[in-house]
Amino acid sequence: MAAAATAISLPHSVSPPLQVTRRRPAPPACSHSERGVSFDPGSAFYRSDSAAGRDLAILAATLHRRHGRLDPSAPFLCLDAMCGCGVRALRYLAQAGADFVWANDANEALRPIILTNLSRFERGSPPAEAGRRRWVVSHNDATRLLAERYLRREYFDVIDVDSFGGDAAYVRAALLALKIGGLLYLTSTDWRSARGYGSRSSLSSYGAYVRPMPYPNEVGLRMVIGGAAREAALLGFHIRPVFSYFAYHGPIYRVMVQLCNGKDNDSSNYGFISHCKSCGQSQTFGFDELGRISCGCTDRTDVDLTAVVGPLWTGPLHDASFLTEMRSLADEWGWAYTSENGVTLEKLLSMMIEESDPRLPPGYIRLDEISRRAKVNSPPLSTLINSLRKEGFSACRSHIGTNVIKTNCPISSCINVAREIRNLR
C-alpha cells in the first residue's frame, strides 16, 4: 500500500526544472509508424528492425497491467531509462495503457524530438486529471536516475532499459526502483562476450566467465538473465524470466524478467554449462559439482576437450503460459499474422512457447553438426524433430538460431536417428 500511495503522488514529485511550463512543440512530421503509432525519430539512433522487441514489451506490459499487479487499482507506471527518440515511451502510453511514463535519455540534444513525439500523444488524448502529469522527460545517467527514484521511494511497474554494449551497472538500481512483481526489460548488444571473446567483460558485467560455445546466441541470453538473478539475490529478491528474445541485427539480446519477493533457495537454475568438443554433448552442472565437470567420453584430465561457461541461468528461457497470453493478445489486436520487418509475432511466439518446455536443457544442436558426425546428408529439420518426438524426446525449433534444434536427446541418439531417416529414404 505504501508503494501504491507513493505511485499516486509520483507525478507531483518531479523536480522543479521539469515542472516549468513550456510551449507545446509542433506536431512531428510522422516519418515513421509502429503498429499505428506515428512518430519522428529525428537525429536519434533508431532501428526499425527492433520493432518486434518493442511489440513484445507492449504485449507483456499490457497483460501485466490487466492482471499481473499486486494492486490493480494503483496507477500503472513505466520508466524508459534510455528512450532515444521516445518511441518506446510513446507506445507504453498509447498502447500499453500506462497512466504515467518517465522518458529519460542522457543526450539532452534529443529533448526537442522526445517532447514533440510525446506531445502528439497528449494532444490526441482526453485531458489528464487536474494536477497529474502523464509523462516526464529528463536527461540523466540511467543508473543515477534509477537510484534517485529508489531513494525517493518511487517505484515503477515496468522499467525498460534499451542499453548499448554490455555495461550492466544499471541492473541493481533498476531492480531497486521496480515494484515487487514488476517487469524489467534488459538489453545487451555485447556479442563478443556472448561468443567467448570478451570473458573479462562478461565476468565484470554479469558475473559469468564465457568461452566459445556452439550456441553463443543462447549463451548471451542466459548470461543476461544470470546477471539479473545474481543482482536480485544480493538484494534479497529473485527473478523469473518472462521471455528472452534474440534478434540477429546488432545482434541484440533482450530479456524480460519479473521481480519476485524473497530469496530463492533453489539454485538449480543457476550454474554451469559444459560442452565436449570430442562427442558434441552439452551438460549442466551445479555449484556442488565443481571439480567433477567432465564428459564420460573423454579422459577427465584432458581439460582442453571440455569448455565450461558460467555461472549463468540454466533454467527455462520463457514462461509458456505468459507467452500464450501474449500470442492471444497479439491475435486480438491484429498483430499476430502481420509481418513487421520480416518478423511474424505468431510464428515467433509459437517457437518461444515450444522452447519453454522445462525438459529442454540449455543449448541447441546445429543440423550440420549432426549430419557431419553421422556422415549423412542433413535430414529435413521437421522430419528430425518429429522422429525424435516419436522416440519420446522433447524437440523443437529455436528462434535463436536457424537450422538448429533444441532437444533433450543425447547427440549420439540424434546421430542414430539421422542415419535411420536417411536409410529409410
Image (cartoon, helix red, strand yellow):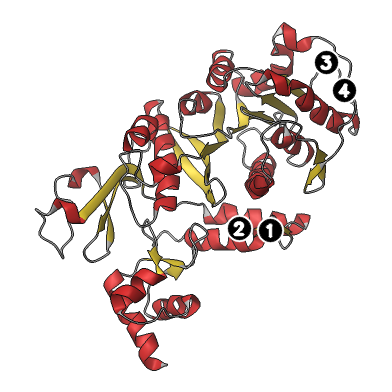
Q: Tell me the quarter of the image containing the C terminus.
A: bottom left
| Left-right relation of 411 to 124 | left
Q: Position of residue 311 (x, y in %)?
A: 31, 41
Q: Position of residue 72 (x, y in %)?
A: 68, 35
Viewer-side residue, 212 vs 11? 212
Distance of label 4 from label 3 (alpha carbons): 21 Å
Asked whether the residues under the numbered discs 1 and 2 touch, taking CB atoms below 8 Å apart as contact, a structural biologist would say yes
Going from N to C along the chain, the mark reached first, 1 or 3, is 3
Q: Position of residue 129 (x, y in %)?
A: 85, 22
Query: Which of the labelled discs sits on residue 25, or is there none?
Result: 4
Q: Quadrant of residue 113?
A: top right
Asked whether the residues under the numbered discs 1 and 3 touch, taking CB atoms below 8 Å apart as contact, a structural biologist would say no
Q: Amino acid at mark 4?
A: Pro
The residue beneath circle 1 is: 328
| Left-right relation of 71 to 222 | right
Q: Amino acid at mark 3?
A: Gly
Distance of label 2 from label 4 (alpha carbons): 40 Å
Measuring 42% from the left and 81% from the top, which residue is drawn there?
A: 387
Secondary structure at badge 1 equals helix
The residue beneath circle 3 is: 131
